[in-house]
């Protein structure tokens, strides 16, 4: 009897506890909110398995018809889940698509996600904070440079652009416009080998105020270098395509400089000192790997140049998308959360491994050579370290291999022709910062290609 | 005894049911996932009360320091929660910030939210779908034009730009470049009053291939109109600033046209027919109200022009931000979800009310007049309806009121001077598509201003 009563009592107490638990839980977790649908769509897309050789995105083909986002396969993979490797497939080593950092962002999914509301910053301007620039994003960019130690931001204006391409054009424009002393156009020069965009833009936009003149050293030696004509020199450091740290070639009161530091991050180069120039460019594409977001910034010393650049940005795109600025802010929060430790170690580690593999292969070749750069002390990693550039700048050494791009194309590797960079066709640029699949495919072909060379040499 | 046993049995069954319930519930709702933090941050920001006179955003000032996003108050409101009205505050009726649509997006919070992952489309291009354009976004834009009936999209290329400003420049560039028959620059003309950006861009970029010549009718009458010189005419319809439907002024084999249809949506104008021109421009800013996203598109008939425009976009910004394209896709999904019913009715309803109030006030004035446009049949709303333009194009009728902008500024209303549009200073443009607060403040001052006028007349 006593036993029975106890049983009833325990059972009733348990029931009460359960009831309280359920009521309490319901009151705190029962919250169907406006972010639910979007969150579940994002999680669904992220959970699509593409065999590690592709990715599904919420805005993938067919989603308007209610289909599940499909796998978009990496180069040389196919099938619904990207599980089939296409044999004899041409390797893409052309563009500098910075997908080597993608694994970092997948690993940091929670910290880097952003929910954007339908009414997020519909206005042209950031109300109360100045015109077209998110004040918090500007702050975090200054913090980032301080943490990495790659640029002085004190007494600098920061201006945002839609991709490095736009700010490059804005800079050139601003500096050619502040050339009031002369009615002849400013000359644009840079050192061979140079980033092809410099030339392409200048020629395409065909401004009456600007003329592209090519190599800076050639200009220095030329008789047209009269110390009067206004000259703008673009200094890309580390350089695209060869990864070397560069200095300006020209000097004089008639020369103005644009320093393109897109690659001056610990992934690619020792950070030897904080740069302190009049006009420096940086790009999110090579900072976090988000080329698709089209976001870059300039550090500008002179107020008049800054104002000219701002006018250019306003008249060409009225500032940078607020969607992009929101995304960039969240990404940079993750980057500086641990002082950059995780992302820079990951990115540098990845490129270091890639260069070791590459160097090993090319060390067996007499037909091809790679650029070599002496290691330097890196203030960020606090040690002497080698350069791990974004691109292999390959030279074809045999006299008969005049067009190096074509030599590689014949074995199904698409690089970028040396002549695009104002250099000889004897060079080809191979991109090393693409996805792991692209790199693995590149290495697989290179290995065979170079080992054949050894066989030929042996058999002679 | 029997009774007791029953009690125990019921209690135990209840316990079992509760246990099952909790286990089952835990297995389905216990899912801490990677979108949680971002979702909760977004909901927190959205729940900040700003007294209906401001808004808090996830990227607001101070969030990097861990502060709650602060209220950003509408013009003339201040205080931590925007609850204080600033007396005698100047009214902003200048820019065309399309915040009149913000209440629609707040109402449609769930449908319009987007979660963007940290690894969302990091690449420069949409893999497998062509270069810089989201295929789904292109599809939904074609659907939207079909649903609204404002443009023919068959046999048209669609190109995306970073704001209407960029595509306008790309169009002008492409058309001046396809002018191969002559070495003299193309002339750019448009009808007075015209959108100031047309002139500002042409003059600022100072291309060797283009010269701005102002009013199209003046050019037609001028002796320089030799039917040989290449001319590009920009036709803005409905027109900015006056909201009238416009047609091209010039004709001849030497004339090319850019049709700017940014305002050709049911909010502002009857949809009289689907436009079917060679090159038409549209903008997200005036379609969904998202000026901050900087997204617009062009419908282009001729492949050569399309290719030239594409080259321009690539060389100036390498396409449009993938973040923006994702956001735009989600917004347009909501718009066409019900065939546009809700958003166009809401937006048109809002502007209709605003115009009724405005007309009533100005009907009491002899000093000022408004533009008048005859109602027309609207294929979208299937009825004859009045025009409800974005801007009041106000004329100061008294001979002594030569500068209408200054007359309004004296009573603390900032509009835009008529001379900015190539017109007389006797006109001023007042924006009617801003937030309800901006409109209410405008009306409050206008009422007093115009009633004073009546008093003066009476007292004479």
Image: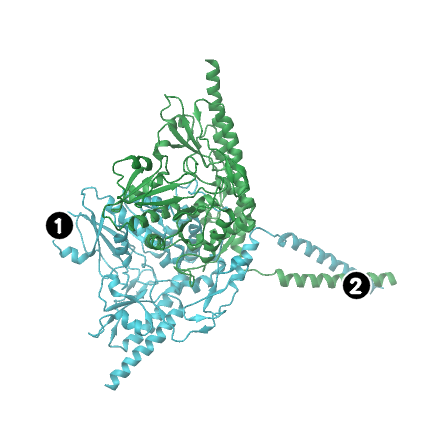
Chain colours: A green, B cyan
At 55% across and 47% down in the image, what residue appears?
A108
Quadrant for the C terminus of chain B in the image: bottom left
Quadrant for the N terminus of chain B in the image: bottom right
- The vertical placement of B84 against B47, above or below, is below
On the question of residue B52 being in view, the answer is: yes
Query: Any mark on residue B226, and which?
Result: 1
- The vertical placement of B191 against A399, above or below, is below
**Direction top: furthest residue:** A460
Q: Are marks 1 and 2 on the same chain?
A: yes
Q: Quadrant of residue B412?
A: bottom left
Going by the image, does A298 lie left or right of B301? right
Q: Nearer the viewer, mark 1 or mark 2?
A: 1
Query: Any mark on residue B7, and which?
Result: 2
- The vertical placement of B350 against A106, above or below, is below
Marks 1 and 2 sit apart, C-alpha to C-alpha, by 105 Å
Q: Earlier in the sequence, mark 1 or mark 2?
A: 2
Q: Residues within 10 Å of mark 2 (few under 14, many from 20)?
A: some
What element does badge 1 sit on?
loop
- The spot of residue A346 in percent (x, y) is 55, 41
Q: Chain of mark 2?
A: B
- The spot of residue A226 in percent (x, y) is 26, 40
Going by the image, does B419 lie left or right of A421? left
């Amino acid at each position: 009897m006593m036993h029975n009563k106890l049983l009833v009592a325990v059972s009733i107490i348990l029931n009460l506890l359960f009831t309280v638990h359920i009521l309490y839980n319901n009151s705190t977790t029962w919250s169907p909110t406006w972010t639910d649908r979007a969150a579940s769509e994002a999680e669904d897309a992220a959970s699509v398995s593409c065999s590690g050789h592709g990715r599904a995105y919420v805005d993938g083909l067919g989603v308007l018809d209610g289909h599940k986002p499909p796998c978009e396969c990496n180069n040389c993979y196919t099938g619904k889940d990207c599980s089939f490797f296409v044999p004899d497939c041409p390797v893409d080593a052309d563009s500098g698509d910075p997908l080597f950092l993608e694994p970092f962002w997948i690993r940091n999914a929670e910290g880097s996600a952003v929910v954007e509301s339908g009414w997020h910053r519909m206005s042209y301007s950031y109300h109360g904070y100045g015109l077209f620039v998110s004040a918090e994003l500007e702050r975090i960019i200054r913090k980032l440079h301080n943490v990495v130690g790659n640029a002085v931001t004190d007494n600098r204006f920061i201006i945002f652009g839609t991709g490095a391409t736009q700010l490059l054009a804005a800079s050139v424009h601003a500096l050619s416009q502040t050339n009031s002393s002369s009615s002849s156009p400013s000359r644009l020069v840079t050192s061979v080998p140079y980033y092809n965009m410099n030339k392409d833009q200048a020629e395409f936009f065909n401004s009456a105020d600007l003329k592209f003149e090519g190599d800076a050293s050639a200009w220095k030696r030329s008789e047209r270098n009269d110390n009067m004509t206004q000259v703008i020199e673009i200094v890309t450091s580390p350089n695209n395509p060869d990864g070397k740290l560069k200095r300006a070639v020209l000097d004089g009161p008639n020369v103005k400089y644009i320093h393109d530091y897109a690659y001056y991050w610990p992934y690619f180069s020792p950070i030897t000192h904080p740069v302190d120039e009049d006009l420096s460019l940086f790009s999110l594409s090579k900072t976090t790997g988000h080329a698709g977001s089209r976001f870059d910034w300039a550090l500008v010393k002179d107020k008049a140049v800054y104002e000219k650049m701002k006018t250019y940005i306003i008249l060409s795109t009225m500032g940078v998308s607020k969607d992009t600025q929101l995304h960039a802010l969240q990404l940079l929060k993750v980057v500086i959360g641990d002082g950059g430790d995780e992302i820079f170690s990951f990115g540098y580690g990845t490129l270091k491994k890639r260069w070791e593999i590459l160097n090993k292969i090319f060390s067996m070749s007499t037909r091809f050579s790679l650029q070599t750069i002496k290691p330097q002390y890196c203030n960020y990693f606090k040690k002497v370290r080698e350069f791990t550039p974004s691109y292999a700048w390959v030279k074809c050494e045999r006299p008969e291999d005049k067009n190096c791009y074509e030599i590689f194309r014949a074995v199904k590797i698409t690089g970028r022709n040396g002549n695009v960079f104002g250099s000889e066709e004897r060079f080809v640029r191979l991109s090393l910062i693409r996805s792991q699949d692209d790199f693995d495919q590149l290495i697989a072909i290179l290995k065979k290609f170079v080992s054949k060379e050894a066989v030929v040499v042996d058999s002679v």
